[in-house]
Amino acid sequence: MNHLAIYGSTEPRTDLSLLDNLLRTIARRLAGCAITIEHSFADFLHRTGIPLPEGAEIFDVRPSEAAELALSIGGDGTFLSTVHMLADSPTPVMGINSGHLGYLSAAEMSEAAELVDAIARGDYLTRQRSLLAVTVIDPDGTEQPVRYGLNEVAVLRRDTASMITVDATLNGQCLASYHADGLIVSTPTGSTAYNLSAGGPIAAPDTGIWIITPVAPHTLNMRPLVVADTSSLSLGIESRSDTVLLSIDGKATPIAASRRIAIAKAAHRLKLALLPGRNFIDTLRTKLLWGV
């Protein structure tokens, strides 16, 4: 390992001693490795009195393309933020959980020695995860910049208790008009996130699918639907409010209800770094307490 980039949660936390131990372990066992730290996380470390590894440099948003691995220290929200900041970078991302669930994480904070030793040996696996490419289209046909989602994109009601109607077109053919609080389009990676809470199925991460799941639908026959991730999906919106919420990986922004949303499979994929011997089935049992 020649170049390691580090991102992290800047939220108040009670595990500062574990975080300090992790960074000291990185500094000790990765001697000679260039270590760079994202600036907001570096500021957080300064405020809490945790020293940066000696010689560590600070970067803004994205590290050098030479970075061989990016660590994301926090929960799933921190991991998703890291993915968004890296955008289409080829750098693999490894999550270290210090949050509640950490479903996307490769290891826990308490496993610092094992984790850093594996990184030093290059003993980790990379897996490709598909991304959603989301384009918002104005009524005049103007397209806004494409945004990417690892877990899901959701259209949700805003400023009113009334339902919205989401008219979904799949591969140019009218699919359905969903009368609901919203609609979720999930990747397999995101199937255990908002999709699961809304009653959608869990999907293995290497399946080439999307899951379309209504949120609190008005009619009970509107059920989750699994489609190929090579599909094109267009969403039109009707609402009593002038705006609705567009949520991508949990980050919600208001948009005009007159806009359309186009969803396609992104041309690039995320490289997810995992420790050997840990897999999807083990994660299900551990994180979701199956069989406990």
Image (cartoon, helix red, strand yellow):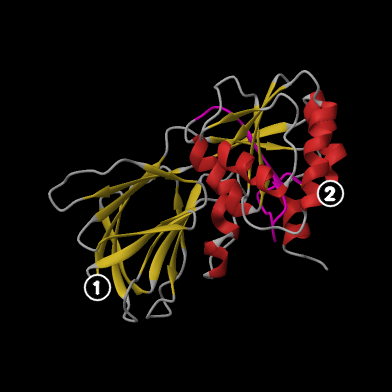
Badge 2 amino acid:
Ser
The image shows residue 203 at horizontal and vertical percentages of 59, 54
Crowd band around label 2 with a 10 angstrom C-alpha radius: few (<14), some (14–19), many (20+): some
Which residue is drawn at the image coordinates 35% and 71% (left, top)?
A: 157
The image shows residue 77 at horizontal and vertical percentages of 58, 53
Q: According to the image, label 2 marks what residue?
A: 110
Seen from the viewer's position, the closer of residues 236 and 105 is: 105
Badge 1 amino acid:
Ser
Are the residues tagged 2 and 1 within 8 Å (C-beta)? no
The answer to whether residue 177 is above or below residue 62 is: below
Segment colored magenta: 89-107
SS for dot 2: helix
The image shows residue 123 at horizontal and vertical percentages of 79, 28
Residue 99 forms part of the magenta stretch: yes
The N terminus, quarter of image: top right
The C terminus, quarter of image: bottom right
SS for dot 1: loop
Q: According to the image, label 1 marks what residue?
A: 241
Seen from the viewer's position, the closer of residues 191 and 44 is: 44
